Amino acid sequence: MKILVTGSAGFIGSALSLRLLERGDEVVGIDNHNNYYDPALKEDRLARHSNKNNYKHIRMDIEDGPRVKSLFQEYKFDCVVNLAAQAGVRYSIENPMAYINTNIVGFANILEGCKNHNISHLVYASSSSVYGANSQMPFSVHDNVDHPLSMYAATKKANELMAHTYSHLFNLPTTGLRFFTVYGPWDRPDMALQKFAKSMINGDKIKVFNYGNHLRDFTYIDDVIEGIVRVIDKPATISLNWKEENLDPAKSKAPWRIYNIGSNSPVKLLDYISSLEKSLNVIADKDLVPLQPGDVHNTYANIDDLVRDFEYKPTMPIKKGVDNFAKWFKSYYSY
């Protein structure tokens, strides 16, 4: 297939581009290379696949409606995977308009491109953050998600609603993937694992929010990529048992689907840090502080629908995943 991957210099987008190229797909990647974090890391991720024969990279912003329109007209994609987004829960409190511009306006441009060019399947990144104030564990795609706790979460929920509208009005197959705390080699420097590792190696204190007591369903990058690839190959269909009198948030009479991609095995933050301490052979100097605004207490993915529809479940143990990250981190940053 010819596949558009947006955010292709990002953590997940770069890994996905590599995987698609390895299996023989043609990939057009776009990324705006913004400075939310060090652009040099994006350039190094991109260098892993930018010279491959079936890869074309374009530096552009999905907020740029005319350029997105021209992109779809020129390349005639079979499938689109939208991973471009302004990430980060806490940054969304400081700079909400960045999230409106990229995550809402940019996503609308992608939807328009898909609608106007008969795209066979749009797969897009949602987030476990949409569960917000929901305290029923594990989080299920069949749960109500109407109480987001950050602008980032609100924009991701909006993406799901926007996609449903296009699926309903234009019969566009769309699948949203709620990722749960993705980690591993080449991840973002604003994420906990890189921040912890850098501070620990340099002998600095690490801030441990919620006193280290909250649970996170950490999901290894390779597991996430396997899930995305399986979803790409199976476009969303209508729910044959959909009933208007008993609305299910995960079902629709339109070709629209939502899935959790998580390890289905939450880990206490202090245990996550302990795994990193062992991998780096360093004891962390911890500053235990309260939960931050916008953060949820716990995340835990119910992946029954993913297992049923794709016969897939993430498998990477947390200790091995963290160890893989630590080896990459020390090599990449020359520690």
Image: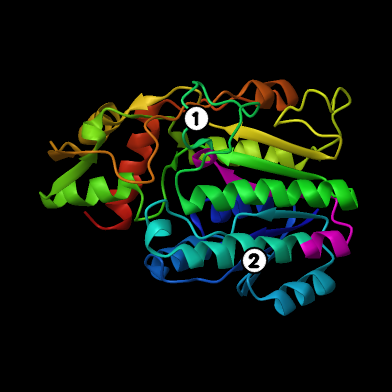
Is 209 part of what is drawn in magenta? no
Q: Which residue is mark 1?
A: 134
At x 41%, y 47%, the residue is 185
Picture colour scheme: rainbow
- Residue 249: x %, y % from top left: 70, 31
Q: Nearer the viewer, mark 2 or mark 1?
A: 1
Q: Does the rendering let one see residue 23?
A: no
**The residue stretch that appears in magenta:** 112-130
Upstream in the sequence, badge 2 or badge 1? 2
Q: Which three-letter amino acid code belongs to the residue tagged 1?
A: Asn
Seen in the image, is 151 located left or right of residue 236? left
Task: Look at the numbered disc 1 and give the secondary structure of its residue.
Answer: loop
Check the image and report above or below for 298 versus 17.
above
Is 122 part of what is drawn in magenta? yes
Seen in the image, is 254 located left or right of residue 26? right
Q: Residues within 10 Å of mark 2 (few under 14, many from 20)?
A: some
Q: Does the rendering let one see residue 79?
A: yes
Seen in the image, is 192 located left or right of residue 22? left
At x 59%, y 41%, the residue is 225
